[in-house]
Amino acid sequence: MSTIRALRADRTGMAALCAVLLFVVLALAAPLITALYGKNATEHYGQNAPGLLSPEGLPVLPNGGISGEFWFGLEPGLGRDVFAQLLYGMRTSLVVAVAATAVIALLGTVLGLVVGYLGGLAERAFTFVCNVLLAFPTLLLLLALSPVVKTRFVDPGENEPVWMQFTVLILVFAAFGWVPLAMVLRTTVKSLREREFIEAARASGASRWHILVRELLPNIWAPILVNVTLTLPGIVTAEAALSYLGVGIDEPVPDWGRMISRGAEVFYDDPTYMVFPGVTILVFVLAFNLLGDAVRDALDPRTAH
Amino acid sequence: MTGYVVRRALQAVAVLLAITATAFGLFFAAPSDPALIACGPKCDTGQVEAVRHSMGLDRPVAAQFGDYLGGLVAGRTITDVDGSPIDCPAPCLGYSYALHQPVLDAIADRFPATLSLAAGALVVIVVLGVGVGFTAALRRGTRTDRLLSGFTLVGASVQIYFLGYALQYLLVYATGALPVPGYTPFGSSPGAWAAGLALPWLVLGFVNAAVFARLSRVQMLESMHEGYVRTARARGLSTLRAHLKYTARGAGAPLVQLLGLEAGALFGGAFITETVFGIDGIGKLAVDSVVQNDLPTVVGTVLLAAFFVVVFVALADLLVARLDPRVRLV
């Protein structure tokens, strides 16, 4: 309870929490908002109506074609609505990030708990695997693995179904993301293992399952929570980076990274287009980092300012 | 100390071996067909089979891996698509059929660009990161501390693929304060080398310095209250000297380790920075080879990046063991 009170007293933390919640609500309500706004994320408005894009594909109106009609302007080339794309891009980011973070939290918790409690040979094998995974250039591996997985499961000539693109991305992120959490939990569990309450449980004949789930797990949720607030924005940016580099979710699913990559092609002529996804990612990650700091401070008052 | 060095080195070799096996298994066991790519779209089935045979791709993966490891240690001869032999001296990382040159040569061609970028960025990271972190720690709770903490928070949250373009627009296109970023070899013109890399250094350095600044602030705050710092001050050392001589040394270990990891990662190629600024380094080579399905180059760059991380992390550990005698006992 004192943790929640400490969090509520932290004004920056509460502001960050509100920002994060706002993002979630916007993503959830995207279909409703775009319906009220009267545009969707896939229609090529600039190509369908004359006078919106120049022959070179750039918005005619200044500042990327911002107007009362198109609040954040038009995408150069295809002429899609930037506001609708941003909203739906948020859904792409959040689906990948939330799902991958959930898998990471589960994997990391199970591995950290079990290895920390067992120790011995399991721990040595675990340390070795962690060292190998940590030395891998993760981004490059993500970049290289996605097409490999695609060719494995999709027949040549066919398009990869959207759900599979998401699943591959989530699993690849999870496969390399669990290491930091598992390493932290192993250390925590190792020190908890020697405490009296575990000894008491063992002496009273409690099963291993009972000790792991009922005795140890309730004592490690703080590092899990801190890790989750750090992992989630990391995956949002990594997902955007992959799409920026050309591997990731394909068209026509809206994606922030792909917006940046398209913006990079035209940023001398139409810098406005890139500002929207760029600033959105910045604000999103900033809010999560602030929230993460607040959670950490609330859980561990020693690190507070 | 010798025992520690030997143990650490053996561990590094074992990790590298495991990484080689994993990378090789992941990419060569993958069903995308290197023979088809090497031969090109005009080949018929018979030609592809011939190419597959001459490349040794019809042999079991274990045997291919054996060849690869042998090539790494002792060099080997690789057969080109048309059947002509190519000499690939140790450490042989294979032959890129897309680039028509041994992978190691392709890497060597681009390494100076990556090295220049990484070295400059590391200087920015250390100076900015440690400077900001230590200043914030010494002035803990003041307005300076809050200002610097806000600064690092932005650095930790901003993305290279946004900041890079934004600064390029402002400093290069709109005001002309800097020339168009890019890589000019140091040997041909040191001035153009520095001017072309100035913006990449700053962007890559700033983004990575943020993590460094946060860690050095926390470490500094923690070790400020250690008994040995209090003892030093009680014995009459001035505050600043006590902090520089003892606090910094006590706080140094995790910083050195982070720097090792950072250096290893940067020498393996800064994928995004190189792509944003059009620097033809190892990161860009890796991204291009992924897009072109050039498997030997992908594996080669993965191995190189892992090699740098393992070596620099090991070096950092050794340095930490020298700095802090408590580590050696573990």
Image (cartoon, helix red, strand yellow):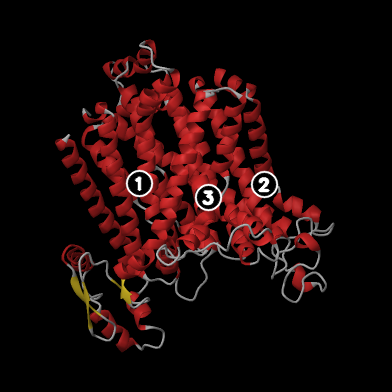
Q: Which mark is residue B202?
A: 3
Residue sitting at 59 percent across and 20 percent down? A6
Report x, y in % for residue A68. Answer: 85, 57
- Provide the secondary structure element on which disc 3 rests: helix
Above or below, comparing residue A112 to residue B208 in the picture: above
Q: Nearer the viewer, residue B166 or A46?
A: B166
C-alpha span from label 2 to label 3: 38 Å
Report x, y in % for residue A22. Answer: 69, 40
Amino acid beneath label 1: Leu
Does residue B40 appear in the picture of this structure? Answer: yes
Amino acid beneath label 3: Leu
Q: Is residue A36 left or right of residue A260?
A: right
Q: Nearer the viewer, mark 1 or mark 3?
A: 3
Count up the numbered dots.
3
Residue B114 location, quadrant: bottom left
Residue sitting at 61 percent across and 48 percent down? A281
- Provide the secondary structure element on which disc 1 rests: helix
Quarter of the figure that contains the N terminus of chain A: top right
The chain identifier of the residue carrying mark 2 reads A
Question: What residue would you read off at disc 1?
Answer: A134
Report x, y in % for residue B243. Answer: 41, 23
Q: Is residue A284 left or right of residue B322?
A: right
Question: What residue would you read off at disc 2?
Answer: A28
Give the mark nearer the N terminus: 2 vs 1: 2
Report x, y in % for residue B137. Answer: 50, 26
Q: Nearer the viewer, mark 2 or mark 1?
A: 1
